[in-house]
Image: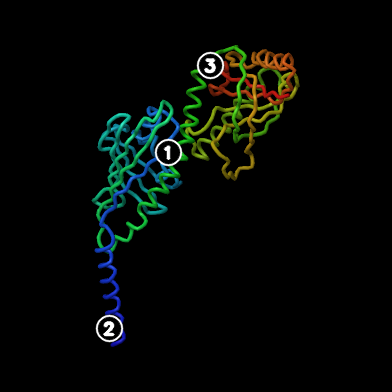
């Protein structure tokens, strides 16, 4: 009995010492600031923060879990919009609100985690650095914690900063694809031959051999587009602004063959693990390309490809694969809208 009394006294003393140290040395709440820059214009960046459907796609707090469920509440964008979330695997849940918005300048979020009645307040300030660069500054104020819970404040700032770092990588990938698509659409000049440098790409897709008789090839392309797109969007959960335009890669002059071998895929920001052996990644190295934009029947693309090959021969350039990038998704019975690129080298 005496032994248990001694243990009880020691426990009480330890709890008292812990409580005293928390009271005198650890703040009951935390305030800190984190600052980042992204190489995208303010109007592109701000919309990723004030639209909570966009926000939850790239913010690591939400996107890192495959089991989280999120409900969105009207007006869905700007002041007054809100979400509730629940993750049965981690047993985390809560609500998030946008309480204030000054377009392209500031936002105020309230985050209620689990059943805590006191929210984390997050003010985000956006500053235009240049036409193509935006500074983002987070001002974070955490809720007051009880003495026994206050140790959490030792790692709150580090945890938040780590989440921001991961989120910024996701945001850059989302904006990179979105801005690239916008720029490509704005720059289209059909039937004009141009020279472009193509950056490295990582493309997820399928290797295919198909008949080249009549419209059999295009029907096969449409089928494989649907196959790859369903895998990327449904199985991998990728959104439209997280991926590039679908692309078909093949030999430049095999349009004359009875059977065509090609790789059809969708560019992703990075290589990821996949369990389905029907799909594979193809890495495309940086190249110099002769480019022409084409709109019309799929069979009519041959003339555009021949123009690129003739240009290469005239310039005494050797050429490799031809890339057919579908600006509009291929669909049976419809004309195509595509960018055709021929990789060239000395």
Disc sitting over residue 275 in the figure:
none
Residue at left 71%, top 17%? 312
Quadrant occupied by the N terminus: bottom left
Whether the residues at callouts 1 and 3 have beta carbons within 8 Å, the answer is no
What is the secondary structure assignment of the residue under circle 2?
helix
- Residue that sits furthest to the bottom in the current view: 2
Residue at left 40%, top 54%? 90
| Callout in the foreground (1, 3) | 3
Q: Within 10 Å of the Cα at label 3, are there few (<14), some (14-19), or many (20+) other Cα atoms?
A: some
Q: Quadrant of residue 191?
A: top right
Residue at left 37%, top 54%? 91
What is the secondary structure assignment of the residue under circle 3?
loop
Q: Give the percent coordinates (x, y) of residue 199.
A: 59, 30
Q: Give the percent coordinates (x, y) of residue 264.
A: 63, 30
The residue carrying mark 2 is: 5
Q: Give the percent coordinates (x, y) of residue 122.
A: 30, 43
Left/right of residue 224 with respect to residue 179 in the rendered view: right
Disc sitting over residue 188 in the figure:
3
Does residue 3 lie above or below 289 as drawn?
A: below
Whether the residues at callouts 1 and 2 have beta carbons within 8 Å, the answer is no
Q: Within 10 Å of the Cα at label 2, are there few (<14), some (14-19), or many (20+) other Cα atoms?
A: few
Q: In terms of sequence position, does the residue under pointer 1 or pointer 2 come before the other? A: 2
Disc sitting over residue 57 in the figure:
1
């Amino acid at each position: 009995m005496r032994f248990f009394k001694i243990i009880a006294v020691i426990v009480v003393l330890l709890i008292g010492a812990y409580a005293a140290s928390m009271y005198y040395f650890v703040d009951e709440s935390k305030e800190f600031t984190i600052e980042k820059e992204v190489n995208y214009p303010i109007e592109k960046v701000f919309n990723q923060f004030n639209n909570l459907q966009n926000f939850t796609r790239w913010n690591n707090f939400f996107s890192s879990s495959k089991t989280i469920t999120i409900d969105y509440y009207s007006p869905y964008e700007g002041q007054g919009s809100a979400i509730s979330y629940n993750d049965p695997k981690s047993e985390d849940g809560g609500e998030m609100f946008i309480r204030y918005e000054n377009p392209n300048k500031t936002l105020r979020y309230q985050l209620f985690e689990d059943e805590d009645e006191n929210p984390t307040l997050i003010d985000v300030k956006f500053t235009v650095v240049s036409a193509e660069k935006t500074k983002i500054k987070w001002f974070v104020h955490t809720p007051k914690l009880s003495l026994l819970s206050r140790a959490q404040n030792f790692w709150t700032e580090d945890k938040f900063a780590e989440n921001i770092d991961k989120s910024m990588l996701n945001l850059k990938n989302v904006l990179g694809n979105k801005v690239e698509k916008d720029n490509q659409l704005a720059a289209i000049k059909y039937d004009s031959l141009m020279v472009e440098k193509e950056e490295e790409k990582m493309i997820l897709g399928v290797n295919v051999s198909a008949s080249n008789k009549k419209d059999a090839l295009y029907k096969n392309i449409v089928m494989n587009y649907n196959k790859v797109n369903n895998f990327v969007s449904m199985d991998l959960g990728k959104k439209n602004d997280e991926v590039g335009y679908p692309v078909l890669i093949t030999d430049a002059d095999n349009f004359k063959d009875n059977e065509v071998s090609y790789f059809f895929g969708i560019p992703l920001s990075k290589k990821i693990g996949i369990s389905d052996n029907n799909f594979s990644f193809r890495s495309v190295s940086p190249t110099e390309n002769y480019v022409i934009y084409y709109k019309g029947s799929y069979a009519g693309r041959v003339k555009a490809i021949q123009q690129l090959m003739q240009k290469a021969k005239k310039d005494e350039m050797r050429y490799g694969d031809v890339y057919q990038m579908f600006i509009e998704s291929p669909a049976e019975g419809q004309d195509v809208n595509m960018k055709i690129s021929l990789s060239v080298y000395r």
